[in-house]
Each structure stands twice: as structure tokens, then as C-alpha cells.
Image (spheres, rainbow, N blue to C red):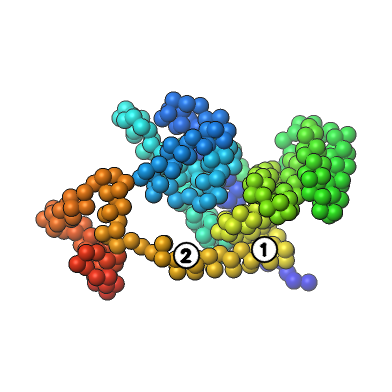
Amino acid sequence: MATDTRGASSGYTNWFKLELVLGRSSAILRQLFKDRYQQFFDNHWDDTPTAGGTFYTNIIDKGKNKSKFNLTTVQKRLIQKGNTNDWDITTLTSLLINVTSPQMPKKAVVQRLSEENRKIADIREIRNTLAHHTTKQLSNNEFIQLWHKLIAILVYFGQNEADLNKLKDDINFKSASASDSSVIDSENTKEALRLKDLGNKAFKDKNFVDAIAHYTGALLLPNLTNNERAILYSNRSASRLGLCKELSSEDECYCALHDAKEARNLYATWWKAHYRVGKAYSSLNEHEKAILAFERAEVLDPLNKEVKDALDDSRSIHVRQQRQDHLDPRLKPQTVNEHLKELQEETGIDPNYVRMCHSLQDKIDPANADVVRGHKFFFGDTHTKKNDEEALRYD
């Protein structure tokens, strides 16, 4: 039998512990978004499609704002749905950093917002470091550096430092996570098990609507353990994905993603919860996010062929998508002239005025003038042909 060397590696454990603690920032960022929305727009955010749709139309998808937010199709759709509980860290950090008040705040408020935004940018940086880490293994030194940085940020936003540091030793990858229910109701547990078995049978028979109904009935029962609820959400997510394919219903795919995230939140050290998140993202053609979820599942269960196959599939599709994007002429970099025309359409700024400012840079800021020249050689401009070698001279 193969030896599970990955499971024994402290490097993977270090990476995953940071992933779990990073997840705590989501609740902080959600509340911060709601507080700022109230402050900036004098309106309460109620997690409804009405709030999401209005916000998306009036803020995200308006004029020059379009270029500020680097959001995927799924992220845009989830914003429109309005439920902040479904927004991931990249969505929340992008909104918090880029959405500003329509009125000029007082100096003290500006200073506070700037400091908060620096912390938010640090959260995004840590998230990206973990998400794009090639081996998913962190040395003890790397772990300690990132841990202290992340803990300091969470404490700044009101978390208890002692409780956070206690997590370092309390996170257990082998046993079930503790339930938050003070009372475990044996009768409800039996009824939940009965409904789960009915749901499993319906799922095997491809009666996805019935399966969803059975799992939903079980989830309505009080005093189940976190792990029991996680399994029910996971199963319902799989059923929703089955219904999504059967009906070609994108809405069911989003519901599947929601259920998978609920399972992950309840039982973060269970490989299948992360696998379900990956499958939901894959169904929505968001393979970069699917890859990250599958990688988390693989860290928790390294020898699982189901996870490996799903991860390989998403990686293969993602590579093909990147190649297609590279070949799509609509996605090629604009020339400086094209960029200035677009800037004029969005802001009304005259391209000639911008070029005049460029010409003054030689006297005012020679270093910045070289950067502008480099851009012109790299992207091409009126009277300037693209020349990568010349561009490198000014890099």
C-alpha cells in the first residue's frame, strides 16, 4: 500500500492552518462592507437581490468603474444576488478597496479608511500567497511570518489574539470538528439519518428533486452536530449539481455552490466539503477557483483518486482557456492611442492634454518620462512602433 507521505508533512499542515484562519477574515470583511455601505450611501444592506442588483448597476457596472473591479462572471452574478455570505475574499477585498464614498469624508475618516484598506490589501496578499503557492507546503519560518502577519490584521479588526493563537494547536485534521450545539438530540439525529438515507436513494435513482427535499427536511431539524449538517449540505450540493445538469439551470449551480460552502464552513477539515466547492465552481466554468478547492481537498486526502481526477480535469481546462484568451484579439493590450481614446470616452479628458503632460515629464520627472517611453514602445503608439527591446531599455 502506498504511504501517505503528504499527510505526515508539517508543510501541508502549516499551509492548511493558515487557510482555515484566513477564512475568519471573511466574516470581518462582510461586516465591514455592510458598515461602509451604510456610511457611504446612507442605506442598509439586507443581503437581497434588490440590494445586489441596484449596487451592481449603479456602482460596479457604471462608467469608468467597470475597469476598477477585476471580477469574474460568477463573482458579478453573486454580487447581483446580494447575499454577502456567498462572496469570497477576493470579491470582498475588491469591493472594499475600490468602492468609495460619493461625498468627501472628514480627514479622520479618510485616515481610518486608508489604514483599513492597507490591512485589507494585506489580507488579499496573504490569500494570493496561499492560493498560488506551487507546492502547498510552508516551512515553519514561512508559516510563522504569515501567521503573525495575519493574526495582527485580525486583531486590528477586533478578533481576540489569545483565541486566535489557541487555534494553532487546536486545529485537528483527523477527528471531527466540535459541534456548536450544547444539546445533541438523539431523536432528531435518528430522523436526520432516515431522511439522509432516503435522499441518498433518490440521488442514486437520479431523482434529484426528491433528494433535495429529503436533505432539506433533515437540515431543518434542530440540534444536529456540525459534521452531520455538513454531510447533509454536501449531499444536497451534489443533488443540486445533478439537477443543474439535468435542467441546464445555472441557478441550481449557484445553489450547489452555496451548499458546498456551507458544508466547508461547518467542517473545514473534511476533504469532501472542499471537493464539493470545486465541483460547483467547475460547473460554473470557474476553473481557477475550482483548482484551489480541489487542491485543498487533495491536501486533506492525498490518495483520493476522485479528487485527483477532478483536479487534473480543471487544470487541463484552465490551461486551454488561458491559451484561448491569449489568442483572442479582443484581449490583446491596447496601443497607447487606443487607451487614450477610451479614457476620453469614459472621462472626457482630451488625449492631447495627456500627451502634453507626457512631454512635460522630461523636465519635471525624467524617471517617470522613461516609464512613459517604455509603455509606448511596449504597446505601440502614434509615430512609435512596438519594439520590445527598446521597451526593456526603459523598464
Frontmost of labels 2 and 1 is: 2
Please tell me the numbered disc located at residue 310: 1
Q: Quadrant of the N terminus?
A: bottom right
Left or right, residue 235 beside residue 319:
right
Left or right, residue 228 beside residue 194:
left
Name above or below for residue 358 compared with residue 259.
below
Name above or below for residue 9 compared with residue 341.
below
Name above or below for residue 220 compared with residue 208.
above
Left or right, residue 317 beside residue 3:
left
Identity of the residue drawn at 80% across and 37% down = 217
* Within-10-Å neighbours for mark 1: few <14, some 14–19, many 20+: some
Task: Identify the residue under disc 2.
Answer: 325
Looking at the image, is mark 2 or mark 1 earlier in the sequence?
Answer: 1
x%, y% of residue 332? 39, 64
x%, y% of residue 153? 47, 41
Helix, strand or loop status at disc 2: helix
Q: Amino acid at mark 2?
A: Asp
Left or right, residue 372 beside residue 34:
left
Q: Quadrant of the C terminus?
A: bottom left
Contact (Cβ within 8 Å) of mark 2 with mark 1 = no
The image quadrant of residue 319 is bottom right
The residue closer to the viewer here, 12 or 229, is: 229
Q: Amino acid at mark 1?
A: Ala
Helix, strand or loop status at disc 1: helix
Q: Is residue 169 visible?
A: no
x%, y% of residue 43? 47, 26
x%, y% of residue 154? 51, 40
The span from disc 2 to disc 1 (Cα, nearest Å) is 22 Å
Residue at the left extreme? 363
Identity of the residue drawn at 75% across and 41% down = 229
